[in-house]
Amino acid sequence: MRTQTWRTKRLLKGAVTLLRNTTWKCGHVEKRVVQHLRKAGRRTVKVADMIRHFKIERDRRARAELLDALRRLEKRFIVKVLD
């Protein structure tokens, strides 16, 4: 079993805030994340709640894909992950 890095632990315990409402040049997972944040209507959404919403608690591949999408969105300054 692979151990989690500090970046992954930070993402799993953090909350996500939508900074810019754009999905230009984003993949389908990134678009779903931005759409969920837009529809949530709240300022921040916990990553654990997003994992529960997308029903990927047990699917390790889908969960890793979601975390990668969050990293890409954070790198493009579309979302901010709060610790």
Image (cartoon, rainbow, N blue to C red):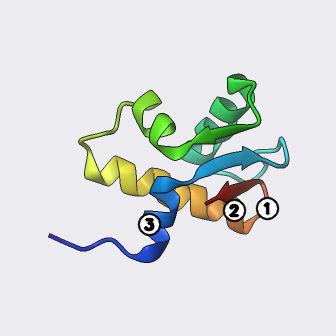
Tell me the SS state at disc 3: helix
Q: CA distance from mark 3 to mark 1?
A: 18 Å
Mark carried by residue 77: 1
Quick one: label 2, few (<14), some, or many (20+) residues within 10 Å? some
Mark carried by residue 74: 2
Residue 1 is drawn in which quadrant?
Answer: bottom left
Badge nearest the viewer, 3 or 1: 3
Between 48 and 77, the residue placed more toward the observer is 48
Asked if disc 1 and disc 2 are in contact, CB closer than 8 Å, the reply is yes
Mark carried by residue 33: none
Between 80 and 69, the residue placed more toward the observer is 80
Location of residue 10 in the rendering, given as x and y in whole percent from the top left corner = 50, 65
Residue 57 is drawn in which quadrant?
Answer: top left
Q: Residue at x 65, y 57 (%)?
A: 81
Location of residue 62 in the rendering, given as x and y in whole percent from the top left corner = 36, 47
Q: Earlier in the sequence, mark 3 or mark 1?
A: 3
Q: Earlier in the sequence, mark 3 or mark 2?
A: 3
Q: Residue at x 30, y 53 (%)?
A: 61
Location of residue 31 in the rendering, given as x and y in whole percent from the top left corner = 65, 41
Between 79 and 27, the residue placed more toward the observer is 79
Q: Identify the amino acid type marked 1.
A: Phe
Kindly give the residue lying farthest to the left in the view shown.
1
Residue of label 3: 8
Badge nearest the viewer, 3 or 2: 3
